Amino acid sequence: MKALAIEASGLLTTVQDAGRYGFQDKGVPVSGAMDRAALELGNELVGNTPGAAALEIFSGGFRARFLTEVSFTVTGFDPDVRLNGHGVDLWTPHTARAGDVISIDAGSLGLWHYLCLAGGIDVPFVLGSRSTYLRGRFGGLEGRALRPGDVLETEPSGPSSPRGSLPENLRPAYAAHPTIRVVLGPQAEAFSPEAFDAFLGAPYVVSTRSDRMGMMLDGPRLKHRATADIVSEGVAFGAIQVPGEGLPFVLLADRPTTGGYTKIATVLSVDLPLLVQTAPGRSVRFQAVDLLEAREAHLKRAYRIRRFFHLLRHGGL
């Protein structure tokens, strides 16, 4: 069903879902949403499966016209959203009618915004995912960023009426200068004690040399005990590599499938949304936790979210 006509696509708007898993051994990156929490929670608010395809909008400048009646929500950090010129609440399902115009502009803080439509964006699956991988020119809509004149369809959706905003305490705790929790390693032994003092003791500034593949950080250089090189191995979303120059580089959604540099730490999955939404020129700090604390943070958040949507669907709210 034709649902949305793009009138302005901003700096970068692509179709993204939860990612393309199972092909990293073939050299195919996972890709998917930069802010997975914003994508998944937005989808659940309009009755989709969490990993359904949506529009990922970088830094606003987006405008589109609805071609049919559809439920939608917008998530992310601090966008300015308007429907027919009137402000729209974030993290809240709304109903648009044919002819309505939505605009999404960047606020003063965040970078990545998500427009989730009931049913999810319907583009062809490529290797099991609808996500756009721009460097490979596949997935999404013809493997490219959206542009004015594009028309997007949605999958059929079940009957559902918009209700209930997502409570503030279930949204990612975005901040202009966040503290990001990490688990040290897996190559912790490759770094000097002074490297850990610097990494955990000083702020790092997000560099303009950052994109969907990774985030370069400017700050104290980290000293290796010997070499920065290792035998290439698989890398996770949020792994923090430190090449020979000593500056940390955080691997993100479009990261390569393997990496040959030592990794000083890995970002907790629950804190990845805070990190990816930190704009160039703003600073982050790192705080080390152990695996037990990381697992507890993940499970507690997952339980609270599951409980909220269970109550929402069964009339308990």
Image (cartoon, rainbow, N blue to C red):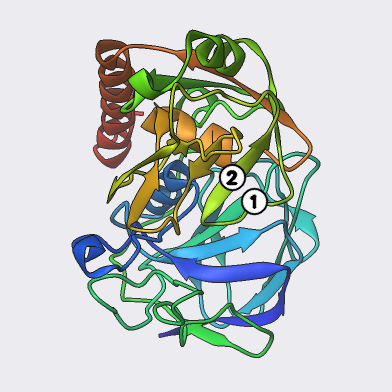
Q: Is residue 123 above or below residue 102?
A: below
Residue located beneath label 1 in the image: 210
Residue drawn at x 74%, y 49% is: 208
Q: Quadrant of the N terminus?
A: bottom left
Q: Going 81% across and 41% down the picture, which residue do you hit?
A: 108
Residue 81 quadrant = bottom right
What residue does disc 2 label?
Answer: 215
In the image, is residue 221 above or below residue 28? above
Horizontal and vertical percent for residue 91?
A: 54, 43
Who comes first in sequence, dot 1 or dot 2?
A: 1
Mark 2 neighbour class, 10 Å CA radius: few under 14, some 14 to 19, many 20 or more: many
Name the residue furthest bottom.
149
Q: Amino acid at mark 1?
A: Ser
Q: Is residue 220 left or right of residue 246?
A: right
Percent across and percent down for residue 280 are 74, 43
Classify the position of the C terminus by image quarter.
top left
* Direction from residue 14 to residue 316 in the image, left or right: left
Position of residue 104 measured from the top left corner of the image (x, y, whole percent): 71, 60
Describe residue 29's horizontal placement relative to residue 106 as left or right.
Answer: left
Left or right, 197 with reference to 30:
right
Q: What residue type is disc 2 on? A: Met
Q: Residue at x 43, y 27 (%)?
A: 226
273 is higher (above) or lower (below) than 264: below
